[in-house]
Amino acid sequence: MSRIEVLKTYKIFIGGQFPRTESGRYYPLMNSKNETIANICLSSRKDYRNAVSAARSAFSGWSERAAFNRGQILYRIAEMLEGRKEQFVKELVSQGVKAKQAEEEVSSSIDRLVYYAGWCDKYQQIYSSVNPVASSHFNFSVPEPMGVIAAIADEESSLLGLVSVIAPIIAGGNTCIVLASESKPLCAVTFAEVLATSDLPGGVVNILTGNSKELHSHFASHMDVNAMIYCRTNAAEQKLVAENGSLNVKRVFFWQKDWTKAESQNPYLIMDLQEIKTTWHPIEKIGIGGAKY
């Protein structure tokens, strides 16, 4: 008797857990031979709202962690991705990526995590400053994380595009909700499995699968999201994202990059998602006779 293969249903990732979409919807993922290889959750607006709540709850704990510890956790994610390298290569190949290109993409994703792990405890030193002022004060300007970041990841770069967006967000102490590629979603959910078994606290990264046409306006208009990153090339969606983001003066960034290039990784992507806090501190002076003023 011929056997019917049991296909995996790839769930979404919210708050460190793997729920099914609350809508109960899914779509079949097809390979180049028009064969169904997996079932993928079709996320709804409610899923996104749940993910924002999880990200907001996780923000205070993650942003207050020592920068060195954030770097350790990103490095741990890279270690675990290295250990599952063959699985990710296989998934990329099943989605139509050539074997050599798939190996390069997974290796680049690991290297990118290590790169941002190294920046976690350095960008503040480079981009902060002590400012000259005319009064008897010290004046410091220091970057601080914005908060909750929503991102729509690259459609074509299934793994590297996803990692290249998540890494600078969390390296800077922010939390995020990311919509993965619709046509190549397998690596995104498998990467969520890596995150869930690493030292990353639940809610810091939340990954949804589904249709950008359905969700992009909700990503940009949610009032508890501090910034929005859009990595695709759809001009109509770009326009709506910019307009909806303006409703609560949300910062909107368009990161359309070739993620395979070295210049697509840099600390300025961390700084895009930082706010500069300036602090004044009085200088205590001692005058004649020991008087303080």
Image: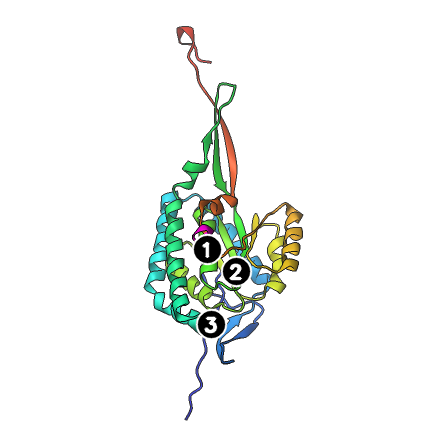
> Could you say which is closer to the camera, residue 274 or residue 48?
274
Residue at 59% across, 62% down: 46
Q: Which mark is residue 266?
A: none
Secondary structure found at label 2:
loop
Give amino acid for label 1: Ser
Whether residue 15 can be seen here: no
Secondary structure found at label 1:
helix
Q: Are marks 2 and 1 in contact (CB under 8 Å)?
A: yes
Estimate how packed mark 2 is, as few (under 14), some (14 to 19) or many (20 or more) residues with alpha carbons within 10 Å: many
Quadrant in the rendering for residue 42 = bottom right
Q: Is residue 194 left or right of residue 151?
A: left
Q: Is residue 225 left or right of residue 271?
A: right
Secondary structure found at label 3:
loop
Closer to the chain start, of discs 2 and 3, is 3
The residue segment tinted magenta is 260-264
Label 3: which residue?
Answer: 95
Give amino acid for label 2: Asp
Label 2: which residue?
Answer: 154
Whether residue 81 can be seen here: yes
Residue 18's x, y, as percent?
A: 46, 65
Closer to the chain start, of discs 1 and 3, is 3
